[in-house]
Image (tube, grey):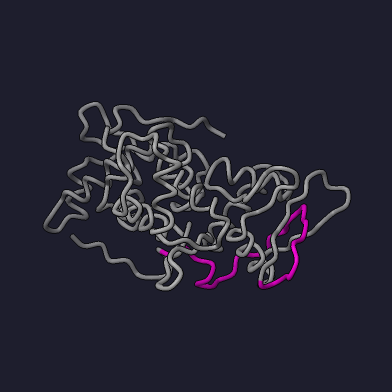
Amino acid sequence: MADYQFAVNKPDRVLINYNTVRSAELKAVYESLVSNRTVQNIVSDFAHEKEDNVRNCISFLHAIDLIERGGDDRVVSPLNRNIFPNLEFEARFLYHLRQQRFPKNHLTRIQNVALETADRSVTLDVLLPRVKGELDQYDFAWNETKLRMWQALSTQLGLVSETKTRGLILSPCRRLLYDLLELYEQQEDSTDLYSALTWIEENFFNVFETTTGSPRVHPAISDVLQNMESEDVLELRGMSDARDTVTLPESVHTQRSRSVNVYDLATLPDSPTYQYPLSQFEQVITQ
């Protein structure tokens, strides 16, 4: 795999302060870059009355190394396209967030803190004091507005889902896990579940509740794996000669925890359940 490249002359603005930026707009701008384009050309495509938010999208994509900007700051070029070239935007976005170094790694760390609750869901009222306590090393003050920015991005990317009664469900969408398990199998020619989930945690988002002893998958992640299994999209097996095992906690499908080692993926279903949130609904980007 090609080496990851960090963009040069990245904006100084804190990522979580891009309050008006949304995943749908970021995806539309990014996917318009089939080749080098000027900033003004991109702005002309998407801005009807106001252009500030389109420029913010370009700036955000630059800040997380999805694009590079030329020396005169007018030309925009895709960056790191040769890394996982067939990966969908949503998973690629999470990969780029995961590569950011301190202090630009704060967006990916919020999900880490959320999973430490060991619950399948969390409200922003519960999450905010935890984030303030564990992520106080950044040069800004955490507040609900900042968490709502993360929530809006993460919901559209399929990392979490928002409900009216339970706050944020911390389960990723099925398509996101399917794509990453499939990519791992293609990259490594392996269906070892522990190795695949470890790779996902290192490169995309957290999946484990604990990694000491027998690694235990977080219930919110395990639920999705077992839902996929119940729909015959994923098969999870325990093999006595396998080196590493992964513990899946009890769920609506099984009343006790179980240990598994390997996985097999069936063909991706042609179903809205196995689409990213941005693909499930027609998105109209307006200013």
Please determine whether, in this image, residue 66 is positioned above or below residue 168. above
Q: Is residue 270 magenta?
A: yes
Give x and y (percent) for residue 201. 58, 45
215 relative position to 42: left or right: right
Give x and y (percent) for residue 3. 51, 30
Residue 37, by quadrant, is: top left
Identified at 53% across, 71% down, the residue is: 273
Residue at the farthest left position? 49
Q: Nearer the viewer, residue 86 or 140?
A: 140
Residue at the farthest right position? 240
Give x and y (percent) for residue 126. 43, 57
Q: Is residue 200 magenta?
A: no
**Number of on-image labels:** 0
Identified at 67% across, 66% down, the residue is: 226
208 relative position to 263: left or right: left
Q: Nearer the viewer, residue 99 or 39?
A: 99
Quarter of the image that includes the C terminus: bottom left
Residue 144, by quadrant, is: bottom left
Quarter of the image that includes the N terminus: top right
Give x and y (percent) for residue 251. 67, 68
Identified at 55% across, 71% down, the residue is: 270
Q: Nearer the viewer, residue 91 or 152?
A: 152
Identified at 21% across, 62% down, the residue is: 286
197 relative position to 133: left or right: right
268 relative position to 14: left or right: right
The stretch of residues the image draws in magenta is 252-277
